[in-house]
Amino acid sequence: MNLGKTQFSVQPKVITPTREMLTSFFLCAALVNGQSASVSSSLSSRRTSPQALANRMPTVAAMQASRPSRTSSKVFKNEKGLQKGQFQPNAFTFNKNRLIDTPQRRGRVRVKGARYTSQDWFRNFRTLLLLKSSILRRISTHLIFNILVAAAAATWFHYHPDTFLSLPVTPHSLSGAALSLLLVFRTNSAYDRFWEARKKLGSVVDNCRGLANVAPTALPAHLATEFGRMTVAFPYMLRIHLTGRGQLKVSETSDAPDVMPFFSQKQLQTVDSYFSKPMATLSIMNQILASKEVTEGEDSTTRLEKLPSRQILQENVNQLVAQTGACERIQGCPVPLSYSRHLSRYLTIWSMTLPYVLTPILGWYSIPVIGLICWSLFSIEEIGHMIEEPFAGLPGDQVQTKRVADVIKRDTVNMYDQQLGVDLADPPAVDTLKLRPAHPAVVY
């Protein structure tokens, strides 16, 4: 170009891409495209030349084509090929300051229960101030009574200090240590029951998964399908039995929509006729394993090959019987009532006499102080009462019986779909098993 009398010629400079430039661009493009695994494998090779990296760089059109559109989630949701319970991967959302999985389809099973994090401190404190705490509501009458006693003691001391009944500090200090030990032992014994119940439910999950994994290959197809339906139904029957709804029919419970598709009419009548619905389900499993149709048409070689697998099925069924008995033991044998009553009386007497110790020292300020002390002690006692009944005493199903049943249902349905290509939610029109109903359920 011409600038006055001086003429300059600008030549385009050809920039040769270096390995560092290509590596950086390839890394950014692959991360945007979701190909982090291929990036790590490409970078791990030291013999890769810059020209080879440039050849493997994705084009802009390919990157735009591979990016998910805004309507991709809707297409995924409405796709008819998806099964019930299948969910969209990598779908997360923020809820209560936590990064948790969010169901994209109906029937998605939450993998985790409610968890507390340090970021929830303000929300938890706010529920206490707004009187929304479930523990605070349960101890409200006891707490209000002790606050009134503290207010009466403060009024007595303010207007008639000469006649006020003042107690020394030493007896309450000594008895407070014994009270603390009683509260700790009571809470620990209750938590042991809660944790034992959770371990038993974990064993139920393991045994049911073992049944769902072995039955499709160890039994004939139609018997394996019936066995799989009973495997799905068992945890729901156990949940109904442990939560005090065993005398209701299955169709009358809240779990009916989840479990009714896996029962035939005759099987449903058989289960409703039992006092213990989980034992009825296990009885049907035993009838399937003992049926002559299991070995019908098989030669001796096939029988010997499938014998270990069928023994595994029988062992898992027997373990489910043991787990059911262990859960019934936790439900039917509470913490001794005399222990709880003695602790409640001890705590009531100690908190009622506390105002006569603190009022001469703190005056009117003893009312809020005693309220805080009683709230902390009563809360610890009430937590022990709540967790000692892990199946029926906790609000919101904290022991996760519903989640356990949903997880077993999801895994069993997926295993049968993969191995046999059948949908367990479609019961046969005609029952292939001859089941005998038990005697009518009797409450003992």
Image (cartoon, rainbow, N blue to C red):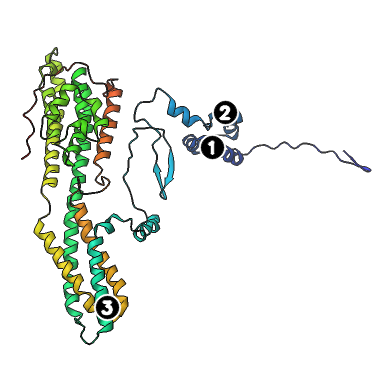
Residue carrying label 3: 154
Mark nearer the N terminus (2 vs 3): 2
Q: Nearer the viewer, residue 45 or 289?
A: 289
Question: The disc labelled 1 sits on which kind of residue?
Answer: Val
Amino acid on which the number 3 mark rests in the picture: Ala
The mark closer to the camera, 2 or 3, is 3
Task: Tell me how far mark 2 sits from mark 3, CA to CA.
Answer: 79 Å
Circle nearer the N terminus (1, 2)? 1
Nearer the viewer's eye, disc 3 or disc 1?
A: 3
Q: Quadrant of residue 214?
A: top left
Seen as rendered, the residue at the extreme front is 159
Q: Secondary structure at mark 3?
A: helix
Vertical arrangement, residue 141 with respect to residue 117, above or below:
below
Which comes sooner in the sequence, label 3 or label 1?
1
Mark 1 packing: few (<14 Cα in 10 Å), some, or many (20+)? few
Nearest to the observer: residue 226 or residue 125? 125
Front residue of this view, candidates 147 and 331: 147
Instruction: For marks 1 and 2, give the CA distance.
Output: 12 Å
Q: Which mark is residue 62?
A: 2
Q: Which residue is labeled 1 in the image?
A: 32
Q: In the rendering, at what x and y percent does residue 427 appear?
A: 23, 21
Disc 2 crowd, CA 10 A, few/some/many (<14, 14-19, 20+): few
Quadrant the C terminus occupies: top left
Query: Visible in this render: residue 357?
Result: yes
The reply, left or right, for residue 150 in relation to residue 171 is: right
